[in-house]
Image: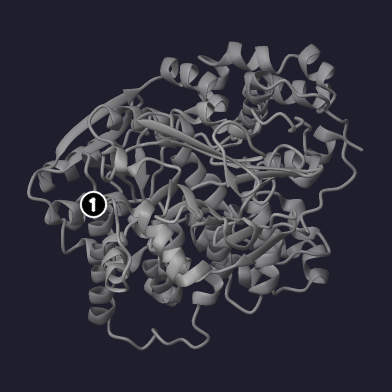
């Protein structure tokens, strides 16, 4: 199992086995394993699994406890003695001192497995507040296993590779599989901010120790504060977060797109650093989508040591075949490819790289938030008027992605946001899969909208994104891409204290006069001329539609071949072929839908599934 994760930790490895509560390296029914990427205390003293002096507590963990030095000082004052200069050992003695409440003391990104041999030998699995680090587990018929990636669980003998049909439907809707589900039955993702405890008798309990919704103020406490005060508080929180994430015994750099988020992170890094920060950017050979010149201009102004890599269709084709190897589940975010290439570029120079991920969700950066603000007023119009059809003449055309949506009897903010985020419409998905219905009632997406229904449209959408899209798409993309080349990515915007501050800010500090990220832009003006960053938002937008018709045409034909689709029994071959034909002839742009199918086929090709049940 640990061997499958060598890319996450190539520097060292370790294992321990127990027979019950007795440590026995020869045999046992319980084990811990670890692959180490050495970041702090590169000596053998940092090896995992690690125990305390008594041998009663054992831990393996992936990630960083950024405030470990302050915690170590506090624990020394309480009488604890340390043998290393690692955050791993801090976890052990923090747990001995405070029990499971120790997690409330941690500021960082982490997936922790901690075995307490006192009183029977409980196992605690802990995931960080925002879900930066992944943690999967499997449970069936008395067997239990856990790992940072699904591929390690596939090496566990008891696991049967049975497809979860509902997970597949959710993948097609969102382009990723939302937690707590995984693509396989009996296999789950531990949710962010959760602790799972497994007793020696097999009893399993799970509880929440942090939830972003609890950080929201019940009163508009920050609405009356002066802009200077908010800027000062935001600047202090972000600077503190960046300083924490620059702590390392190995080289540190940063991803730089030239956008607001990454530019602000790099600007703060450069102000804190004595030497030029090493920055890395991806460019595209198509000038219409190329962002590299923006990153280059920011890097020049700040004086960073900057490197670029330009991407073409050939590199994309090569990387496509590797995505499922590292992502383990179907994953169809197109930004995966440039992120993997960017990680390779950065790893050639550094072992740790900071990124600007999280800024969009926290500070109103997505264009869809503007859409949600406008659509809220539209949805107040009674259904009877919408059904009359007259209303469609004055709804802005950018809101009418599918005119039939507005004529449905039930639609609300949740319906529209799902409509906005989905790759497939509900009807198209049913035709494709032959399923009778799509049930999302148990998803975090649905629960968040239901629980936060009293809030405004932008607040609801942002909270849903933090709990779903950020965790299972953005952070999954970044973690697998960076760790595939043994690069540790760190996200300063996701310091939980900064997150609590940001979600507590009224929307007027994020979106003002139709412009997004108002307060971040104000802060960035302290570091950069406005001309270098004040432009419309632009992501890593590959020319996917064109590539699928031209450079990737053969790939599309191969993996969406009628015989291949028919033999699987998962998708309707006629529906798939219609999509391919319409896209190839240029009558429709089906690039997102075709890409999601291709990525599923690539994943399916790499995993030998025992049985794939047909949809009912």
Label 1 element class: loop
Q: Nearer the viewer, residue 370 or 259?
A: 259
Q: Nearer the viewer, residue 431 or 601?
A: 601
Badge 1 crowding class, 10 Å Cα cut-off, few under 14, some 14 to 19, many 20 or more, is some
- Answer yes or no: is residue 533 visible: no
Look at mark 1 in the image and give the residue it sits on: 247
Quadrant in the rendering for residue 344:
top left
| Residue 81 image position (x, y, % from top left) | 30, 61
What residue do we see at 25% from left, 55% from top?
A: 264
Residue 359 lies left or right of residue 563; in this view the side is left
Q: Nearer the viewer, residue 610 or 478?
A: 610
Residue 275 lies left or right of residue 523; in this view the side is left
Q: Quadrant of the N terminus?
A: top right
Residue 284 lies left or right of residue 608; in this view the side is left
| Residue 242 image position (x, y, % from top left) | 26, 57
What residue do we see at 43% from left, 28% from top?
A: 7
| Residue 208 image position (x, y, % from top left) | 60, 67
- Answer yes or no: is residue 62 visible: yes
| Residue 288 image position (x, y, % from top left) | 36, 32
Residue 531 lies left or right of residue 29; in this view the side is left
Q: Quadrant of the C terminus?
A: top right
């Amino acid at each position: 199992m640990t061997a499958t994760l060598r890319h996450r930790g190539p520097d060292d490895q370790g294992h321990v086995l127990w027979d019950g509560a007795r440590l026995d390296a020869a045999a046992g029914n319980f084990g811990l394993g670890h692959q180490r990427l050495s970041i702090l205390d590169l000596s053998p003293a940092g090896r995992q699994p690690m125990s305390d002096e008594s041998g009663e507590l054992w831990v393996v963990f992936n990630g960083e406890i950024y405030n470990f030095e302050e915690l170590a000082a506090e624990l020394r004052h309480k009488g604890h003695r340390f043998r290393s200069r690692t955050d791993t050992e801090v976890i052990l003695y923090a747990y001995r001192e405070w029990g499971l409440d120790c997690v409330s003391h941690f500021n960082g990104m982490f997936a922790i497995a901690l075995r307490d041999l006192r009183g029977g030998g409980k196992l605690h699995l802990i995931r960080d507040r925002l879900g930066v680090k992944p943690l999967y587990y499997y449970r069936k018929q008395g067997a239990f296993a856990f790992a940072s990636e699904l591929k390690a669980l596939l090496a566990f003998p008891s696991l049967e590779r049975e497809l979860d049909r509902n997970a597949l439907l959710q993948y097609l809707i969102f382009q990723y599989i939302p937690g707590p589900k995984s693509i396989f039955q009996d296999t789950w993702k531990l949710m962010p901010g959760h602790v799972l405890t497994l007793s020696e008798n097999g009893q399993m309990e799970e509880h929440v120790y942090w939830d972003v919704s609890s950080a929201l103020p019940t009163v508009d406490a920050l609405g009356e504060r002066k802009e200077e005060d908010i800027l000062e508080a935001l600047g202090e929180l972000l600077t503190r977060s960046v300083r924490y994430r620059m702590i390392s015994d190995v080289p540190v750099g940063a991803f730089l797109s030239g956008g607001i988020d990454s530019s602000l992170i790099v600007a703060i890094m450069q102000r804190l650093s004595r030497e030029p920060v090493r920055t890395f950017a991806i460019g595209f050979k198509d000038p219409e989508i190329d962002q590299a010149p923006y990153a280059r201009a920011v890097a020049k102004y700040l004086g960073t040591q900057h490197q670029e890599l330009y991407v073409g269709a050939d590199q994309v084709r090569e990387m496509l075949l590797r995505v499922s190897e590292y992502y383990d589940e179907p994953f169809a975010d197109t930004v995966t490819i440039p992120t993997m290439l960017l990680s390779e570029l950065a790893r050639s120079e550094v072992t740790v790289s900071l990124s600007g991920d999280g800024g969009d969700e926290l500070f109103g950066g997505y264009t869809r938030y503007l859409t949600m603000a406008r659509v809220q007023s539209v949805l107040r119009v009674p259904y009877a008027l919408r059904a009359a059809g007259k209303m469609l003449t004055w709804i802005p055309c950018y809101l009418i992605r599918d005119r039939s949506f507005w004529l449905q009897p039930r639609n609300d903010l949740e319906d529209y946001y799902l409509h906005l985020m989905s790759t497939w419409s509900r009807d198209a998905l049913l035709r494709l899969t032959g399923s009778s219905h799509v049930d999302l009632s148990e998803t975090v997406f649905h629960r968040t909208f239901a629980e936060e229904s009293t809030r405004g449209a932008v607040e609801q959408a942002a909270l849903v994104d933090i709990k779903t899209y950020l965790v299972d798409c953005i952070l999954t993309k970044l973690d697998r891409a960076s760790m595939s080349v043994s690069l540790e990515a760190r996200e300063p915007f996701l310091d939980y204290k900064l997150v609590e501050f940001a979600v507590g800010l009224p929307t007027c500090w994020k979106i003002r006069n139709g412009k997004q990220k108002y307060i971040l832009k104000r802060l960035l003006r302290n570091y950069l001329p406005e001309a270098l960053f004040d432009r419309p938002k632009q992501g890593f937008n590959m020319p996917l539609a064109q590539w699928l018709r031209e450079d990737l045409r053969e790939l599309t034909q191969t993996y969406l071949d009628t015989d291949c689709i028919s033999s699987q029994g998962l998708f309707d071959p006629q529906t798939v072929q219609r999509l391919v034909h319409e896209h190839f002839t240029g009558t429709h742009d089906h690039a997102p839908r075709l890409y999601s199918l291709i990525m599923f086929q690539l994943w399916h090709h790499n995993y030998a599934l025992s049985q794939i049940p047909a949809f009912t």
